[in-house]
Image (spheres, grey):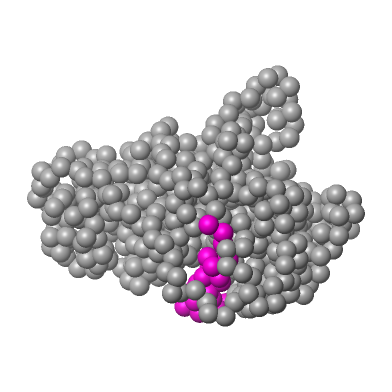
Amino acid sequence: MINPLLTSDEPLLLEDAQKLASQSLDFALLVSGGLSEESWKSIYSILDELARALKKGGILFVQGLPSQLPSLGVYLDQKLKFKYWIVLESTKRDFTKGLPSVHSGVLMYVKGNTFAVNKVRVPHEYCFACGRTLKDWGGKAHLMNPSGAAISDVWKSLEGEDNYSSLGVTFYQRLLKMVDIDEKEMSGWAAPKNALPIPQTKGMIKESKIAYQPNLFSILQTVNSDDQPEDQNKEFPGFNVILQGDALEVLKKYPDESIDLVFADPPYNLDKSYNVYNDELATKEYLDWCNQWLDEYIRILKPTGSLFVLNLPHWSMYHADYLNKRLYFQNWIVWDALSEPRGKLMPAHYSLLFYTKQKEGFTFNYEGLKNLDSRVYCLRASCVRSRKSRGENKQEPLTDLWWDIHRIKHRRDRDYHPCQLPEGLLKRIILLTTNPNDVVLDALAGTGTTIITAAKLGRRFVGIDIDPYYVELMQNKIKEIQLNGKITRIPVKKSKIGLTKKELQLELRSLAKKLGRLPTPEDVKTYSRYELKVYFDVFPTWGKAIKAAKLEIADDKNG
C-alpha cells in the first residue's frame, strides 16, 4: 500500500489541497467526473494547488468526460508538461444525439522534463474464431514480446466498468502501476474519495459527509453572428472541384451554409516531411491558423451539417475548447490506430472531433451503420471468410471508440504523404453524416482520401490544397475513377537484395543470442551472413533493425 495515500472528499477538496506541502507528492489523481457542481467552481484553483504540490518529475492524472477535459488540459498546459490523454473504456451511454459514448479520459501531465514511468504489459489477446492473435502482425510475429503487449494510450476490454463519474478498480490499479517508484516510498493524493475504488485507511485527510452530485454543466453554445466575415462569396468556385491555393483564401469564396460535411486532418505540428507546409509552427501560430479555418468551416456549414477534425489528442484539446463555444459537441471519437512504438505507452489514440451546428436534427444515418463485427474476432480476411461461412457472426454496436479501421502501413497502399488516411475512416464519416449528392469539403486535402471517397459514394466534393503536387495527384485520381470506376495501384516490387525485413531481423536476433547482448554494426561486419550495407538499405535506423534482437535479450534477462 502506498504510504501514505492522502485522500480528500467534498466540500474540502480545495482546502485540503492548499494544505499540501510544496513538492511533496510523487503523483496526484483528480477524478473530475466525480465532482459536484459546487466543486467544479474551484477546479482551476484545485489544479493550481496540485501542480504546486508535485515534486519535480511528479505526475498529475486528471480523469473526466471528453466534453469537459479539453478546457482543463488547455489550462494545465500553462503549468505542466502534457504527456498523454489515456482513453478509459466504460459502459455505453447516450450523452448526445450523436454516437453512443463508451469512454472517459485521463490526462497525464508531468512536472518538469524528466519523469519515471513503468512500461506495463498486458497478456496478448486471441481471436475467438481462429485462435490467432487479435492483432495481425502481418509477418512480424517474431517481434511479439512473450510477456505480453505493452499497453497503449487506449485502454479497452474492461468488462463494463463505469469510468465516467468514478474510476474502476482495473484502471486505478493500472495507473498506479505506471508510477515508477517503490510503493513503500511513494507519496500520493487522490480525490474525491467517493469516486475511488480504494479501502478506507488511516492517514487520510479529514473527510466530509456531503452527498455526491453529478456534474450537470452544459458546454454547448451557438455561434455569434457578429463573428461572421464581412466580405464573402466572391468568385464562387462551385462543387466537384479540386482547387490549389491557401485554404483560408479559397474558403472565403464559398457562401454561408453551403456545405454538408467539412473535414480536416491538419498537419500535427510535428517534425514530418510535408512538401510545402511548415509543420514546425510555434504553438500559438499553429493554433491561430487552425482557428481561422475552423471559423470558415463553421460559416459555410449547413444547419444540418457536421464538422469533423482529426488530430493528436494534445492539439484536439485546443480545437475542442475552441469549438465548444461555437458548435454543439457530439463526440470525441477515439480512433484506436496504433502507430510506431514510442515512449512507455504505445501511441494509438487519434482524436476525431464530431460537432454539429444544431443540437439535434442534423443528418445522422446511424441505423445503416450501427452494427460491427465483434472485437473478439481478428480482422484477417481468411478468418472473416471462414467464420462467416460457418454462420459465426457476433456483433456489437458502433460507438465513439473506433478500433476496427487500421492505419495504412504498406507502401503499396500509400502515396507520398506522411499521414495518409485509410479510405475506410472517411467512408464511415461520410456515410454516417451525409446523403447522396450532399457536398463534402476538405480544405487540407493532401492526397485526396476525403475527396476520392466522397466521389465513390456519390457525394459532391470540394478539395483544397496548397501543394500543386497533391492537387495534380487528386485530379488524376478523380479522372481514373471517372474512366475506370476505381484507382489502380502499381505493385511494389521486392527489393533487389532479395531479403525481407523479417529475415534480416531474425539474423540479428540470432546474433544477439550468440553474443549475449545487442549486436552492433561492427558485429554485423564480423559475424553476419549479410553485408552491413544491406541492413541500412532496408532499415531507416539501427534501432529498427535490432527490434527483434531486443526481445532475445529481454528473454535472457527474464529467464
Work out whether residue 405 or residue 185 is closer to the camera in this orientation and state it.
405
Q: Residue at x 53, y 79 (%)?
A: 230
Q: Position of residue 158 (x, y in %)?
A: 43, 36
Identify the image quadrant of residue 20: bottom left
Q: Position of residue 498 (x, y in %)?
A: 87, 53
Q: Which residues are magenta?
A: 280-303
* 290 within the magenta span: yes
411 w.r.t. 428: above or below: below
Q: Residue at x 79, y 51 (%)?
A: 500
Q: Residue at x 46, y 48 (%)?
A: 360
50 w.r.t. 201: above or below: below
Q: Position of residue 494 (x, y in %)?
A: 86, 53
* 541 within the magenta span: no
Residue 430 located left or right of residue 333: right
Residue 359 located left or right of residue 425: left
79 w.r.t. 140: above or below: below
Identify the image quadrant of residue 394: top right
- Would you say residue 64 is visible in this rendering? yes
Q: Position of residue 5 (x, y in %)?
A: 21, 49
Residue 115 located left or right of residue 458: left
Identify the image quadrant of residue 243: bottom right
Residue 515 located left or right of residue 41: right
Quadrant of the snapshot with the N terminus: top left
Q: Residue at x 73, y 25 (%)?
A: 386
